[in-house]
Image (cartoon, rainbow, N blue to C red):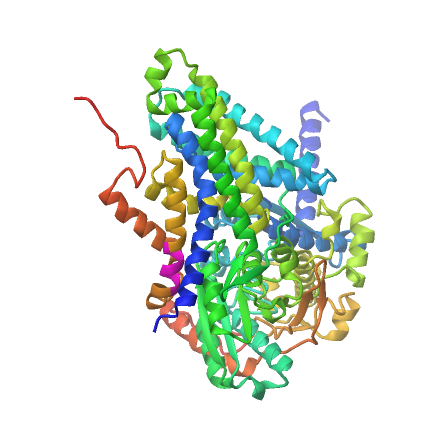
Amino acid sequence: MVDYQFLIEVLIGGLLSGVMYSLVAIGFVLIYKTSGVLNFAQGAMLLFAALTFVSLVERGAPFAAALVATLVIMVGLGITIERTVLRPLVNQPPITLFMATLGLSYVIEAAAQLLWGTQVHGLDIGISDTPFELAGVLISRFDLFAAAVAGALVTVFALFFRYTRTGLSFRAVADDQFAALAVGLRLPRVWAAVWTVAGIVALVGGLLWGARLGVQFSLSLVVLKALPVLVLGGFDSIAGAIVGGLLIGAIEKLAEVYVGPFFGGGIEAWAAYVVALALLLIRPSGLYGQKPVERV
Amino acid sequence: MSMLRRLKMTMGAALAVSLASTLAVHADEQFFPLQSYRVGPYAAGGTGFFGGFIDYLNLVNIRDGGINGVKLTWDEGETQYEVERGIEVYERLKSHPGIAAWNPLSVGIAYAMIDRITKDRVPLITINHGRTDSTDGRVFPYVFPLLLNPYSETSGIVNYIASREGGPDKLKGKKIVVLYHGSPYGKETIPIYKLLADKYAFSLEQIEVPHPGNEQQSQWLSIRRAKPDYVVLRGWGVMNPVALKTAQKVGFPADHIIGNVWSNSEEDVIPAGDAAKGYVAITTQASGSEYPVLQEVIKTVYGANKGNLEDKKRIGSVYHNLGIVNGILNVEAVRIAQAKFGKRTLTGDEVRWGFEHLQLDPARVEALGAKGLFHSINVTWDNHEGDGRVTFQQWDGSKWKVVSDWIAPDWAFLRPIIERSSTAYAKEHGIKVRTSGDDPVSQ
């Protein structure tokens, strides 16, 4: 007999985990949407942000000052990456740009360890991780907070894209780079702004994931959680990143609990990819991704 | 004397002096090649362990002038804990004269080295880890899983839980969940937990966490539903703090989670914050710097600015102390071998003999300044683990505190299982099983 209360608990846990995956996926989407680059260094940027923040706090910086300083550093990092790596590679094939970000991820990881050391750190952002019970179902306060942050982030992005001049430029570039260029938009400036925003998203994701896992090298591995989310939701849709995250989170938890025992357990990592691959066969651009249309 | 003749004589003398000094350097040195990992995902453990090992070698050099006058030297090669890099370092350093032993502190690298070190006749030390059946020195003459193999660890944990419950008979009807890392390392103890569950009649559930273990919500919800009395955490890296944090999320008490030997360091608990308070883990070496040998390291090595740890606060941490103990065991094996073969640079085979006679009783451990740091070791030609005792430590939020006596695993129960596995390995690889310590080793 199905224990419905347990089923709901697993489902809620999965959805809340999925929100955390979405936080990483949004960083990918922002850059892919505007420049067509799949930024594999997003995980390394997340590690760099969290490690910088926690190292500043441990060296005596107040929380707010460390946050602002890290924000400035991440903005600087984003602009530097755009200027020194991506701008010189403009018009190169996508695989070249992808390989550049892959190399970049190693450089950022090494730089993070070189600057701040190899030790692991605890990160307390003041949100308790003790659960509360709602109708017999345990819910994590921290996960709820993370969901609220993700919600706020998406709302801010929606308003930014709709009502600000820079946001409109982002959308124009995302729609058609050549048309955007033709009407006078400065692509390098837009890309620099996008990398800056991606740096900010990395900081938010880094703090939340760092508080969850501890700040350590394996933070950069959370990109692996974002990839099936992107395949499912679409690489160029923020809404897709959110919906994809929720779906992947729920599917992997339900699969682990209810299907895992038939395979000896430990299936959630690849179950998410199975679902993503299956969808890829049906909808290659994901649930919300833009279908490429070519004039022939 | 002609100018040419004088030049020839001068050159000849210079060459002779140079050769003699070169030979003298090698004659008085014992070399430790170190496949260390100071960058990458496991750098925190690597810097601690290799830091401790080097600190102890430095202590012996500075304080005693080496082992009976034989200087200890070493060279490091970065592996980032990757097998192919570990082998690359092996190939690069293996021709260095006077290699005492290899100490990779990596299951993957150690596995990949077994055939190589057996061919090259140099000991491979896998303290607290490695193949369980390499305990059987009859089949694995050059491999030494010193102090603790995975099966002994399993038995030690079950014995500790029994002691908390009031005796082995009280295990009957209890429920234990083993949460293991989804890797060959994590899976190695699955059969032995089953055997021990049958022996003590406790109920057992073993749950896998996929690598790297940064998401465990579903596993811990299953644990919550199973309502176990204890959870054994057989983790690695990020899996450990995530397990403790997720346990807190589902309301499972930390003091009923028992960590294995790779879930017992400061790096495993600090990221978990308050969720780790009360968590208990097995260890072969206590943490802390109050032991005389650690005090000597601080005074003599760090006092001379030759300490290997950048952050002195890490002196006495779990990995640093493991490195110190590893240093003690390596140095004493060389010392024991020197007593038989002479106070000179030894060959790998001679050092192997030293390891096979590495018997340090509590009195000798005390004389080495390590009383309380570790208990004792009794390696023989056919028992390469050496019957190490284990103890359990509890995290109080800022440091580990020992909460048990030294506990002996059930070696008599484990030995036949180990021999079955090693004998099968010998058959498969055409290895002649030794029948005494004097038997020549097969390659």
The quarter of the rendered structure image containing the N terminus of chain B is top right
Give the residues in magenta: A251-257
**Side of A214 where A61 appears, left or right:** right
Q: Residue furthest left?
A: A296
Q: Residue furthest front?
A: A135
Instruction: Please tell me how many numbered marks the rendered image carries.
Output: 0
Which of the two residues, A107 or A228, is positioned nearer the viewer here? Answer: A228
Q: Main secondary structure of the magenta part?
A: helix
Residue A191 % position (x, y)? 45, 22
Q: Any magenta on residue B227?
A: no
Residue A282 % position (x, y)? 22, 44
Which of the two residues, B116 or A111, is positioned nearer the viewer here? Answer: A111
Q: Any magenta on residue A255?
A: yes
Residue A4 position (above or below residue B100): below
**Side of B378 where B83 appears, left or right:** left
Residue B8 % position (x, y)? 66, 30
**Side of A92 where B270 appears, left or right:** right
